[in-house]
Image (cartoon, helix red, strand yellow):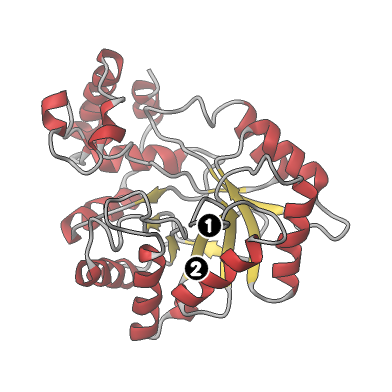
Amino acid sequence: MQLRKLGTTDLEIAPIVLGGNVFGWTADRDTSFAILDAFLEAGFNAVDTADVYNRYAPGLVGGESETVIGEWMKDRGVRDRIIVITKGGLPMGEGMEGLGRDYLPRACEASLRRLQTDHIDVYMSHRADPGTPIEETLETFQGLIDAGKIRHAACSNYTAGELAGAMAASGGGRARYEVVEPCYNLVARDQYEGALEDVCVREGLGVVPYFALAAGFLTGKYRSMADLEGRPRQGTAAGFVTEENLKLLDRIEEVAGRHGATMAQVAIAWLMARPSVSAPIASATRLDQLGDILKSVELKLTAEDLAVLEG
């Protein structure tokens, strides 16, 4: 499998990043370990998580995903084979929020403890912090790099303007964001395509989109509101069930049929075919789901396929 350089960093990643948002939530510890084992054994090497996973789930407080990944890396002795991407800055409790010099280093230290590692390969601001000057944030990231706590600074959920401002403020003792994690998939294209993608291309940034399967919608399993009943992501996926998007599912199914592929494989292969994308992030809660996702790397979409998918 050919690795892809992650933007201008010194990191090389396999063409799919494993989403760790499900670990310690919809995938328990044993299942998570099995998924991580299979992912690594298949030749893939990058895992994405965040300190806040899974604080939004009933009964959880945050840090569960990082904890599972940390325990797995220690148990298997594989830290040197894994590129760890994690994020900080979202609320983790009273007085624990933001990208300022007072809190971000504490958030990083807490992630390091949960991950049971001495460094984070890619450390992201989970979203822009309007209460902290970007200069302060980037100076704080640089301090973490200088201390050996992180290797590369990055960001998620930034607008084109926020990212352009961050790039302009970098240098002179301030870190440079090297990787961007936007929301991007076949059914949600406008947040990335256009101005944000232009900044990423111009600056040579690595791009690892999340929501590759739109909370499962692009697998074709949700074609009505009734299909979502009782699902953990019911509220998230419900917004995708529209007449226009259901027509998109038909087009994905058409392309999948041509190749003897699944709809999930087509959706992920489309992202991998985008020139500006380094590697999409995809999650799995079962081994058969993981196997399906990883087969996406074998699917080569034609120009005709892309034209059908993009309407």
- Whether residue 31 sits left or right of residue 304 in the image: it is left
Residue 306, by quadrant, is top left
Which residue does the image show at 47% across and 60% down from the upper left? 51
Which residue occupies the foreground of this view, 68 or 99?
99
> Eyeballing the image, is 232 above or below 150?
above
Which residue occupies the foreground of this view, 92 or 149?
92
Label 2 SS: strand
Residue 124, by quadrant, is bottom right
Q: Which residue is mark 1?
A: 87
Q: Position of residue 294 (x, y in %)?
A: 30, 55
- Whether residue 160 sits left or right of residue 78 in the image: it is right
> Eyeballing the image, is 65 above or below 225?
below
Which residue does the image show at 38% across and 54% down from the upper left? 55
Q: Position of residue 254 (x, y in %)?
A: 21, 26
- Whether residue 217 sits left or right of residue 204 in the image: it is left
Amino acid at circle 1: Lys
Q: Which residue is mark 2?
A: 83
* Quadrant where the C terminus is found in the figure: top left
Amino acid at circle 2: Ile
Q: Position of residue 308 (x, y in %)?
A: 34, 22
Which residue occupies the foreground of this view, 96 or 185?
96
